[in-house]
Amino acid sequence: MNPREYIKFLNVIEKLKCNTRHSWTTAGTQESVAEHSWRLAVMALLCADEYPELDMNKVIKMCLIHDFGEALTGDIPAFLKTDADEVEEANAIERLLSLLPDAERKELSDLFFEMAERKTPEAKLFKALDNMEALVSHNEADISTWLPLEYTENLVYGVENCAWSDWTRALREELRRNSVQKIESEL
């Protein structure tokens, strides 16, 4: 990739550092999309020993790129995202990847397709961790930042995506316990 293309792409994805998510940090600031993706990649890195048969480099790449489209669309919380929003984000990813040379565009396009299909163990792990990172963030945030629907959503969010492996099921259950404890401490 020539330096000009490289810089142009970096300039576009810089918006991931600016675009905020629904989640809040322990410092009381809204989390950026980039912060979410970074911690998601760290989560994948730290659970690699649980999945020695998986291509964890691929999982980490998925974690790092999965929200690239949000550089152009901004973030829409999962509980508000519509099919039309999904199409808009897919189109944004396509526009963004068009800035890359053929080899990089193909590699990342293939990863996005694999993530969307969610048939490989790598894609399943990525999606489970993506859901769980959101729950970790919500459980860390002050409960005053929660919407009323999150009192129930945090107890069920990601259950289906975590069902494929014993380890992700155990992680999901531990996060559910954290959510219950947080909710009960407010009562």
Image: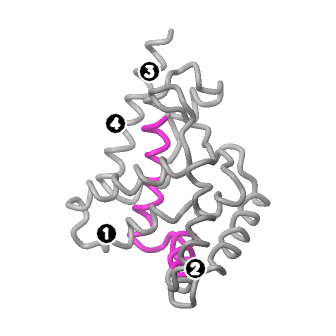
Residue 4, labelled with which disc? 2
Could you tell me if the residues under marks 4 and 3 are in contact, i.e. CB atoms within 8 Å?
A: no
> Which residue carries the number 4 mark?
174
The relative height of residue 60 versus residue 21 in the rendered view (above or below) is: below
Which residue is the site of mark 1?
56
Mark in the foreground, 2 or 4: 2
Q: Which residue is mark 3?
A: 182
Q: Is residue 136 shown in magenta? A: yes
Tell me the SS state at disc 2.
helix
Name the kind of residue labelled 4 in the image: Glu
Q: Are marks 2 and 1 in contact (CB under 8 Å)?
A: no
| Nearer to the camera, 166 or 151 | 151
> Quarter-wise, where is residue 47 in the image?
bottom left
Q: Which residues are magenta?
A: 108-137
Q: Looking at the image, is 66 positioned above or below residue 141?
A: below
Q: Is residue 25 left or right of residue 181?
A: right
Instruction: Check if mark 3's residue and mark 2's residue have beta carbons within 8 Å.
Output: no
Write down the quadrant of residue 144 in the picture. top right
User: Residue 102 bears which disc, if any?
Assistant: none
Of badges 3 and 2, nearer the viewer stands 2
The spot of residue 183 in percent (x, y) is 48, 19
Q: Residue at x 52, y 34 (%)?
A: 154
Q: Position of residue 59 (x, y in %)?
A: 38, 67
Mark 3 or mark 1, which has the lower sequence index? 1
Measure the alpha-carbon separation of dots 4 and 3: 12 Å
Q: Going 49% across and 43% down the picture, which residue do you hit?
A: 134
Q: Residue drawn 55% across and 45% down?
A: 32
Q: Residue 13 lies in magenta, yes or no?
A: no
Question: Seen in the image, is 14 located left or right of residue 83?
Answer: left
Q: Which mark is in front, 3 or 1?
A: 1
Real-space Cα separation, disc 4 to disc 1, in angstroms: 23 Å
Give whichever of discs 3 and 2 has the lower sequence position: 2
